[in-house]
Image (spheres, rainbow, N blue to C red):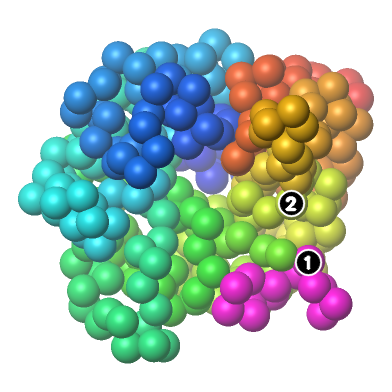
């Protein structure tokens, strides 16, 4: 089986999955409780989410492990269960994916800032190391270091995965649009991110979350200014959330993204999926478009 980056380098486009957090809440996750604990207590529901994305056409699915680091889990007194939670998250997604699809384990930021002295590099590295080893034991193909905003924390995460496992490293930052262009919370541009992550050894780079699929087109172009070869993954929110009749809706419906996804591909994206607000219906639309591109049809 090819590595994900190797498959992309053959010219094939891939479809990843959509939102997990919003899906978990729909299945009954209580506000304020630990989503990752559901891998242990509600594994069937977590499996159903993974399976729904596979059935929608995902080539790559994530794991329910975004906040599975020591710092986040300690808020729920679950730090001792880190390895079990991470390994089980990968096992659940692997069961849904079978052997033909890829599993990328989700690894989110800790919420701690090295620049502020909240945490040491060693503490970050050790948490990421434990997570990565457990993901590999659970059957993951890659780790998706996602929704990051600081280069120093991303560097520790990439090093921890690379030095302790044979997993591929995918790394995505989250950008907001400002008068100075797209920047992360820490003022990092897509170009700065790309240069640094390639030097750190990331196999695939990109962006996730943000304000929607439309804005991701410009971000992809900025990444391509730095590298024509690095595989790019985009996992966008379904637009900006709006509240109507006390219900939360996202502005970019599956129908709306039909005309955006081909433009993302033309800009240079290789792997496309969704983040907050996206559903299996969004992924089905993406998979159909990706399939047509792979067949040489637009």
- Front residue of 211/163: it is 211
Helix, strand, or loop for circle 1? Answer: strand
- Front residue of 193/179: it is 179
Residue drawn at x 54%, y 45% is: 5
Sequence-wise, which precedes: disc 2 or disc 1? Answer: 1
Which quarter of the rendered picture does the N terminus lie within? top left
Residue drawn at x 80%, y 73% is: 178
Which contiguous range is marked in magenta? 177-189
Q: CA distance from mark 2 to mark 1?
A: 8 Å
Q: Is residue 164 above or below residue 184?
A: above
Asked whether, in this view, residue 279 is left or right of residue 41, the answer is right
- Front residue of 137/76: it is 76
- Taking the magenta stretch, the answer to whether it contains residue 250 is no
Residue 104 has which mark? none
Which x, y percent locates residue 145?
44, 55
Q: Which residue is mark 2?
A: 211
- Find residue 40 and report its image quarter: top left
Q: Which residue is mark 1?
A: 177
């Amino acid at each position: 089986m090819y590595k994900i980056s190797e498959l992309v380098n053959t010219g094939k486009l891939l479809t990843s999955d959509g939102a997990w957090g919003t899906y978990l809440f729909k299945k009954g996750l209580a506000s304020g409780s630990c989503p990752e604990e559901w891998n242990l207590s509600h594994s069937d529901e977590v499996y159903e989410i993974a399976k729904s994305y596979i059935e929608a056409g995902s080539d790559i699915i994530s794991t329910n492990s975004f906040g599975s680091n020591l710092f986040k889990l300690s808020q729920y007194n679950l730090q001792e269960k880190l390895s079990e939670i991470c390994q089980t998250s990968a096992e659940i997604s692997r069961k849904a994916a079978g052997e033909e699809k890829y599993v990328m384990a989700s690894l989110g930021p800790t919420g701690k800032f090295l620049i502020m002295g909240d945490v040491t590099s060693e503490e970050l590295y050790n948490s990421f190391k434990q997570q990565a080893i457990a993901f590999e034991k659970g059957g993951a193909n890659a780790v998706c270091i996602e929704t990051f905003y600081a280069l120093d924390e991303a560097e520790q995460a990439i090093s921890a995965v690379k030095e302790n496992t044979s997993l591929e490293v995918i790394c995505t930052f989250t950008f907001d649009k400002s008068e100075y262009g797209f920047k992360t919370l820490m003022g990092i541009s897509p170009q700065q991110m790309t240069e640094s992550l390639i030097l750190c050894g990331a196999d695939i780079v990109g962006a996730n979350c943000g304000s929607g699929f439309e804005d991701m087109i410009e971000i992809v172009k900025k990444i391509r200014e730095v590298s024509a070869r690095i595989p790019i993954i985009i996992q966008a929110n379904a637009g900006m959330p709006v509240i109507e009749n006390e219900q939360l809706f996202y502005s970019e419906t599956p129908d709306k993204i039909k005309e955006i996804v081909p433009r993302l591909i033309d800009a240079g994206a290789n792997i496309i999926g969704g983040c907050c607000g996206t559903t299996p219906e969004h992924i089905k639309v993406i998979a159909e478009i990706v399939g047509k591109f792979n067949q040489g049809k637009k």
